Image: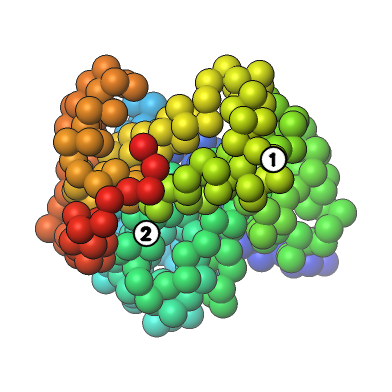
Amino acid sequence: MDASVNRIKPLRVGVILIPDFSLMSFSSLTEPLRGANRMAGEQRYRWTNVSVDGGSIQSSTGLAVPTITLDEGGEFDIVVVCGGHSDETYGNRKLREYLRRMDRRKIRLGSVSTGSFVLADAGLLDGRRCTTHWGYIDALRALCSRAEVCDELYVVDGRIFTCAGGLAAMDILLDIIRDQQGNHFSSMVAENFIYGSTRRPEDHQRMALRHRLDVAHPTVIGAVALMEQFIGTPLRLPKIASRTGVSSRQLERLFMRHLHCSPAQHYVRIRLDEGRRLLRNTSMSVLGIAIHCGFNSTSHFSRAYRQRFGSLPSADRTLKSAPNWKAQTKKIQTAEVSAKQTPSGAT
């Protein structure tokens, strides 16, 4: 009897590449499948790179990957949208209809990095928990008000999964392999990539503050955590000091010793860094970004921005807004009006 009849039927994965897709996310998505096949000694996973129009699709690094069209892809068990840096403004009717058709056929759907915006464009995230890369979470929340957007590494909600991208794509793929082949097999695949310990979906995306700041002092870490939590409505420094259990003077000394700046200076840097991230990663208006970062006017924001980065906010705008994503700015209109009437609590 032919031994092949006892082999597992390969899981067919369709990888939809969006122009300017993240090569890191793409590799983290496909390499575990290749590694699993190698470990098993047979093809248990088969993936096909597809795109709307076929042909070579260029990644964010400039490396192009050949694809076939959606119609040529055939039947898939899982379809994953691999995103990159332009998905907030990416809308394609043919892709939208294709994803909806796959959903009606009960095909498992997923997204990597900002591919979640493509799923949202197709209306597939309404009423679901989901995530995206941390740099785009605010934009997805503004766009997809019917979804529960969180900052977890990856989220599985029924047949749809979303992940933050980068190495988080490997985490979700190892999880899929674990469900099919067991924990031991999945661990062997991870070990093959020198991937010490797989992370759980509820893990946060960003590094712990002590690693980002290279500071271990709990008071400084606690104060910075409060600053990052209250960006749009900045806390006054005595309030931060009180919440961290020290006096304002003690807090000043600790910041100068560990971060070589005053608490007020560091707070402004945090808010301006957030503004720069939003300028580069979303299509929010400059006024909307200023309000989001705790500034009461675009002129105030622009002056501080130029002082920190040496250029005006408009010069850092790398993502243009598109008609089908204009709903994003509507959500902040009330906040903009309110902020014009109420000055910020911090400088």
Q: Label 1 belongs to which residue?
A: 246
- Name the foreground residue: 221 vs 44: 221
**Residue at left 60%, top 20%?**
256
- The label number, if any, that marks residue 316 in the structure image: none
Q: Quadrant of the N terminus?
A: bottom right
Residue 140 - label = 2
Question: Residue at left 35%, top 45%?
Answer: 293
Question: Residue flagged by tag 1: what amino acid is it?
Answer: Val
Compared with 331, 229 (above or below) is above
Rendered location of residue 228, percent (x, y)? 51, 45
Tell me if residue 310 can be seen. Answer: yes
| Residue 117 x %, y % | 35, 58
Q: Earlier in the sequence, mark 1 or mark 2?
A: 2
Q: What x and y, as percent, mark residue 335?
A: 26, 61
Residue drawn 21% across and 32% down? 302
Q: Amino acid at mark 2?
A: Leu
Give the residue drawn at x 23%, y 51%. Answer: 288
**Of the pair 32 and 169, the residue shown nearer to us:** 169
